[in-house]
Image (cartoon, rainbow, N blue to C red):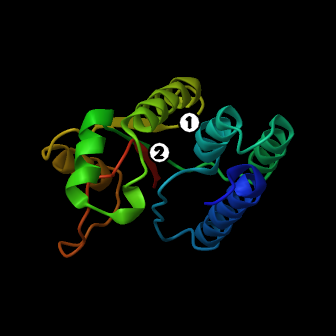
């Protein structure tokens, strides 16, 4: 987005609110399984901290985001941490050729990778997090096996694609 210092907090709060609404829908349907791209807590502890370090969020704005997210957060039953080497991620992005990914640098991917690992190390003891290496094509079979073992009903027509970067998926 343009002018990150001007719009960073509003954008991050809109993202958190969207995740909160998704969590509410999941809570209203306990018999269904919901998969989310990222948890609210990962958003705050990765992208919020990144915003502070890059100047798109102030420390006060980060503190507000963090406190709000922790107050309304609904912990997932399990988080799948798809761990991708930043070089592999960068190469996948270039091969896709999406214009919205043109501005993503290798340096940013390395920074996000390190921040995801820090998040994983900090929260691994607090939540059920399963880490899966996602550097090669065989990783998709491991992901499908994990989801099936967790009781996630997968139809043959459903496809699961490789994540473009290190990500968490909430099940």
Q: Residues within 10 Å of mark 1 (few under 14, many from 20)?
A: some
The residue shown at (34%, 57%) is 151
The residue shown at (61%, 46%) is 43
Is 71 or 10 nearer to us in this picture?
Answer: 10
Q: Secondary structure at mark 1?
A: loop
* Position above or below: 144 against 55: below
Q: Any mark on residue 127, and which?
A: 1
**x and y percentages locating residue 47 in the rendered image:** 60, 43
> Disc 2 marks which residue?
79
Tell me which corner region of the image, top left, top right, bottom left or bottom right, holds residue 63: top right
Residue furthest left in the image: 138
Q: Using the rendered image of the protein, determine whether residue 85 is visible from the camera's viewpoint.
A: no
The residue shown at (43%, 51%) is 103
* Position above or below: 15 against 168: below
* Position above or below: 53 against 12: above
The residue shown at (60%, 31%) is 126
Q: Which quarter of the figure is the C terminus placed in?
A: bottom left
Q: Residues within 10 Å of mark 2 (few under 14, many from 20)?
A: many
Q: CA distance from mark 2 to mark 1?
A: 8 Å
Q: Secondary structure at mark 2?
A: strand
Sequence-wise, the earlier of marks 2 and 1 is 2
Q: Any mark on residue 67, and which?
A: none
Is 90 or 130 nearer to us in this picture?
Answer: 90
Is 30 or 113 nearer to us in this picture?
Answer: 113
**x and y percentages locating residue 114 in the rendered image:** 46, 27
Tell me which corner region of the image, top left, top right, bottom left or bottom right, holds residue 160: bottom left
Residue furthest front in the image: 3
Q: Is label 2 in contact with label 1 (beta carbons under 8 Å)?
A: yes
Q: Using the rendered image of the protein, determine whether residue 118 is visible from the camera's viewpoint.
A: yes
């Amino acid at each position: 987005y343009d002018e990150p210092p001007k719009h960073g907090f509003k954008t991050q709060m809109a993202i958190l609110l969207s995740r909160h609404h998704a969590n509410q829908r999941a809570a209203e349907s306990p018999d269904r399984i919901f998969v989310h791209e990222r948890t609210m807590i990962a958003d705050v502890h990765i992208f919020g901290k990144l915003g502070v370090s890059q100047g798109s969020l102030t420390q006060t704005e980060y503190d507000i985001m963090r406190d709000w997210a922790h107050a309304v957060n609904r912990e997932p039953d399990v988080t799948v941490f798809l761990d991708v080497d930043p070089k592999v991620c960068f190469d996948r992005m270039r091969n896709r050729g999406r214009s919205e990914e043109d501005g993503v640098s290798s340096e940013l991917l390395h920074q996000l990778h390190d921040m995801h690992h820090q998040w994983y190390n900090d929260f691994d003891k607090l939540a059920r997090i399963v880490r899966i290496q996602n550097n090669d094509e065989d990783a998709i079979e491991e992901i499908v096996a994990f989801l099936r073992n967790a009781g996630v009903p997968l139809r043959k027509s459903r496809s699961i694609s490789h994540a473009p970067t290190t990500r968490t998926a909430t099940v």
